[in-house]
Image (cartoon, rainbow, N blue to C red):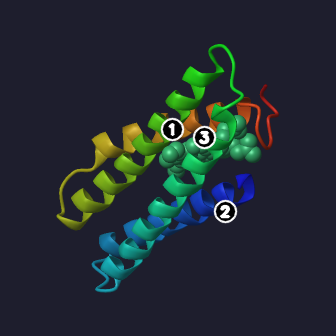
Amino acid sequence: MTHAHITAWAIGIILFFVAYAMYRNKNSKAKMVHMITRLMYIIIVITGFLLYQSIMKTAAGNIHMWYGIKMLVGLWVIGAMEMILIRTNKGKNANAGWIQFVIALLVVLYLGLRLPMGFAPLA
Ligand code: HEM
């Protein structure tokens, strides 16, 4: 599941940048790429939730809380990506979204690589 999760968010983030560039260039196919990006969001959330469930029975101490925070910040990254794409499509300033995206992405990468499942080089 870890690999499915990593694959899902890696593809999701790449598609997010592609959709962003296409909206910027007023490419008529941007909406289509955006819809596929949204499909990746769903896969990211499902794989993330399955990872969460797989450790919840045995999680002890405050690790429980950190998993909860990992999920919330993961959802925040997705929210920021969506905000950027929608505002860019409307021709509005998306800086607030970019700031959130960078902060939330750094935090989620740190938490993901710190928490014990899968790769944990920062543990
Ligand atoms: C774009 C958004 C996201 C990114 C970039 C991301 C990134 C990561 C990374 C780097 C890992 C560590 C993988 C490993 O240790 O091998 C991870 C694990 C995990 N993610 Fe996400 N994630 C995102 C969204 C989500 C969401 C939305 C959820 C929950 C619904 C979630 C839940 C989890 C859980 C529970 C783990 C296991 C943590 C561990 O023990 O390593 N993630 N994620």
Which mark is on residue 58? Answer: none
Residue shown at 52%/63% (left/top)? 43
Amino acid type shown at disc 1: Met
Q: CA distance from mark 2 to mark 3?
A: 17 Å
Q: Marks 1 and 2: in contact by CB < 8 Å?
A: no
Q: Ligand 1 closer than 8 Å to the CB at disc 1?
A: yes
Q: Residues within 10 Å of mark 3 (few under 14, many from 20)?
A: some
Q: Secondary structure at mark 1?
A: helix
Q: Is residue 29 above or below residue 107?
A: below
Residue at the far bottom in the pictured view: 28
**Front residue of 64 and 36:** 64
Of the numbered discs 2 and 3, the one sitting upstream in the chain is: 2
Which numbered disc, 2 or 1, marks the residue closer to the eye?
1
Which numbered disc, 3 or 1, marks the residue closer to the eye?
3
Residue that carries the numbered disc 2 in the rendered image: 7
Q: Secondary structure at mark 2?
A: helix
Q: CA distance from mark 2 to mark 1?
A: 17 Å
Amino acid type shown at disc 2: Thr
Residue 77 appears in the figure:
yes
Position of residue 27 measured from the top left corner of the image (x, y, whole percent): 32, 83
Assign the C terminus to one quadrant of the image.
Answer: top right
Residue that carries the numbered disc 1 in the rendered image: 71
Q: Residues within 10 Å of mark 2 (few under 14, many from 20)?
A: some
Which mark is on residue 52? Answer: 3
Q: Marks 1 and 3: in contact by CB < 8 Å?
A: yes
Q: CA distance from mark 3 to mark 1?
A: 8 Å
Q: Is residue 55 above or below residue 86?
A: above
Of the numbered discs 3 and 1, the one sitting upstream in the chain is: 3
